[in-house]
Image (spheres, rainbow, N blue to C red):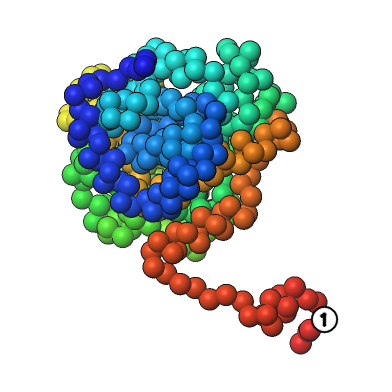
Amino acid sequence: MPYDIKDINLSQMGQDRIAWAERDMPVLRQIRQRFADEKPLAGTKVAACLHVTTETANLVLTLKAGGADVVLCASNPLSTQDDVAAALVQKYEIPVFAIKGEDNDTYYKHLNAALDTNPNITMDDGADLVSLILTKRKHQAKEIWGSMEETTTGVIRLRAMEKQKMLEFPVVAINDTPTKHFFDNRYGTGQSTLDGILRATNFLFAGKYVVVAGYGWCGRGVASRARGLGAKVIVTEIDPLKALEATMDGFEVLPMLDAARSGDMFITVTGDIHVLREEHFKVMKEGAIICNSGHFNVEIDLEALSHLSVSRRSARAFVEEYKLSDGKNIYVLADGRLVNIAAAEGHPACVMDMSFANQSLMSEWVVKNHGQLEAKVYDIPTAIDEHISTLKLASLGIKIDSLTDEQSKYLNDWQMGT
């Protein structure tokens, strides 16, 4: 079995951590049990380009239980948990191509290795596999039944492809369904981003100015968690509706150039390019810390920061010190990549349970329906989303009311007025 990982001898540690994560993934566990009985993915080849974490391991084990042949590569050069990769290879016989800290050439070599297995289904966290197929491996497009996209940035890329008539197979926007972004993006990113910052820096949030760039679901989560630790939170936005919402939520809203003068900690969660750039670096105060929890490492203009700097050094693990020509220091975490997964462990398993339940069930949906699907971006059917939320509530021991016949009739009728 081909694979490329750091150290196969880390497998026992990885297996223990995978089992620990499974404790908090009861919905995915139920799906895995059904998949093991019914084998709905039998004969299907799946190539997954995702963060190689304990939670992802439980996803690929679910797909394998359903009968799929699965190969896994990393969706970020810094996100791989090497012990998890080793466990998947040695303990579970799943090919993995991922090494934490791999260079750009190795990253794309691993993507190509995953696609060399000629998959029917792909899974992305950032649309890299889809992009590679549509640009350099177009002969494989006709073999793809469907693809799943996990994150906001990837869905943005895919909708742009659809608009430009570039998509050649169906794609499911996993990110856009409520049981994903309401919880994974908001609570998962909110908690794990602060976890990554704390592990990298031991930063005290209380009383500090924390600038959150972007008030989407990830930004909402980060801002609320930072405030919960006592930070004075400033939000920057380009969307007037989101800026108004942040204001009504009690946050100060400023243009980035103004916020840059005050911030002690800067966290970008926009999915866009160069949110922090030269004019902002110039006015930041001594010791400012900047990091990114959007998908790609383009939100911080590191080239501009390097141009302004006279020297740089590693201050501690995942912390790079840039000394500017005026003598002040600015600190960048995790090379501008996802701080929550590069410097920590990523989202808690409890929220990834729902995200990866969506991945599993939509893989089954693609297998059943691929002959009727068009080359476009699909949303997850509401029935599947409601099924997952129902299972999650049951796993938490929470019961809710149901409509009476009278209430149901009232909600579906127009005749009863005031």
Q: In the figure, residue 396 lies in which quadrant?
A: bottom left
Q: Which residue is mark 1?
A: 415
256 above or below 399?
above
Q: Is residue 357 above or below residue 271?
A: below
Query: Residue 91 versus residue 404: which sits nearer the camera?
Result: 91
Residue 230 appears in view: yes
- The residue depicted at 25 percent of the width and 20 percent of the height is 6
Query: Looking at the image, which residue is at 57% across and 12% down?
Result: 136
Residue count near mark 1 (Cα–Cα under 10 Å), binned few <14, some 14–19, many ≥20: few
Q: Is residue 70 left or right of residue 201?
A: right
Image height check: is 391 above or below 366? below
On the image, the x and y values in percent for residue 353 come to: 41, 49
What residue is rendered at 18% in x and 44% in y?
202
Three-letter amino acid code at disc 1?
A: Gln
Q: Is residue 186 left or right of residue 91?
A: right
Q: Can residue 355 be seen here?
A: no
**Quadrant in the picture for residue 309:** top left
